[in-house]
Image: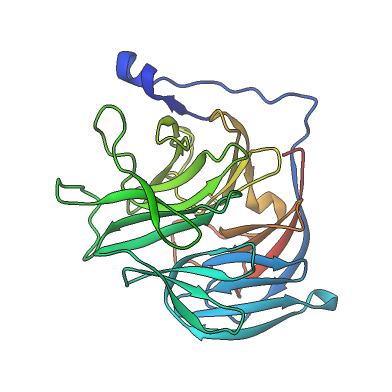
Amino acid sequence: MGRPLRCKIIETFGSIQEENVVDSNKEIELLLESSHSTSLKMVKRIEEISDDKCYVFDESSLYCLEFKKEEKVHIKKIADIKAFDISLLKSNELLIAMEKEGKIMILKHSLKIKLFHSCSGLLPRGIHISKDDKVIVGVREEGEFGLSVGEDCKRQIKILDINGLEENAFEYDKDGKRIVSMPMKIKTNADEDMFIIDRISKLEGRIVFLTKYGNVSWVYKGEQSAKYLFQPWDLVVTSRDNAIISDVANQAFHILNSNGQLLKKHSSIDIGFSFPFSLSIYRGNKLLVGSHILNMDDIKDTCKHKSTNIFRITIKGI
């Protein structure tokens, strides 16, 4: 099924394929609860504010989205800003990793945007606030992005405190190999270990599991039998410390535990929609999924969505 690659095993014997078995007593389900059409071109990221509100952003602006009755949504523009990722502080202030600037900004309650942290020649990518109020951010060097990583490149996972001061940085594993190529998204489990979406080519990604001490435990590269390369875009971690990952190209969700085992791969088409993109845990046990209309001629869109939607999903057994 899945193929998490254990670092010590890879080093000694090369990669192997593991067959992972789900406990038959645990029924995993993703069920469509409701669909909400938006006027946005894309829903790049979603971040829950409260039970009925969330922040979303597209290619150029940040919005506050409020769910209304009868599956309607109200969208209010907050700012014209090009963000790469966002994460919400316990204070409900929003951290914004800028797309083309070496800065992390903070959206205050007054809706004013101020500087939180300067990345000094680096671009922030995926950003996450851990349960113990650490700001975890992936960074790369400024300039045109290249996936072939040279000696002068910087690809790091930085740990900041709540005031934006750097506490630690992880770049190489114990064997001197780079931990990440392009850290797109970061989430933590209850132990503060990290699930990281790492882009390794224009059409392929992987999941790197990094402990809070900077050790790589395993790497997941998708299923070898899949029609398209594994293209993870977003992920969330449930209360059971399982990760739900959106795979855009294969129109599927990959559900992994913290040991790197694939618990289930679930087609979004079977749920009722195409191209799962952005994700957010909603009301503790539900999932918000933002879609994206893609021009991918070789991928059949059986759901025929003509607009960008946000779907509310009930999750069970995860």
Q: Is residue 164 above or below residue 308?
A: above
Q: Position of residue 186 (x, y in %)?
A: 49, 50
Which quadrant of the figure contains the N terminus?
top right
Compared with 34, 239 (above or below) is above
Judge by depth and name the residue closer to the eye, 240 or 20. Answer: 240
Write the residue at 31% across / 19% down: 11
Residue drawn 55% across and 21% down? Answer: 19
Spot the residue most to the top.
13
Q: Is residue 91 left or right of residue 210?
A: right
Q: Residue 48's image quarter?
A: bottom right
Q: Assign the C terminus to one quadrant of the image.
A: top right
User: Between 184 and 203, which is closer to the camera in this rendering?
Assistant: 184
For the point 47% across and 29% down, the residue is 4
On screen, 48 above or below 193?
Answer: below
51 relative to 271, above or below:
below
Q: Residue 207's x, y, as percent?
A: 46, 41
> Which residue lies at the image location 43% right of the left edge and 36% below the top edge?
221
In the displayed image of the protein, which residue is found farthest to the right? 69
Occupied quadrant, residue 261: top right
Coloring applied to the structure: rainbow
Number of marks in picture = 0
Q: Position of residue 21 (x, y in %)?
A: 64, 22
Q: Could you say which is closer to the camera, residue 134 or residue 172?
A: 134
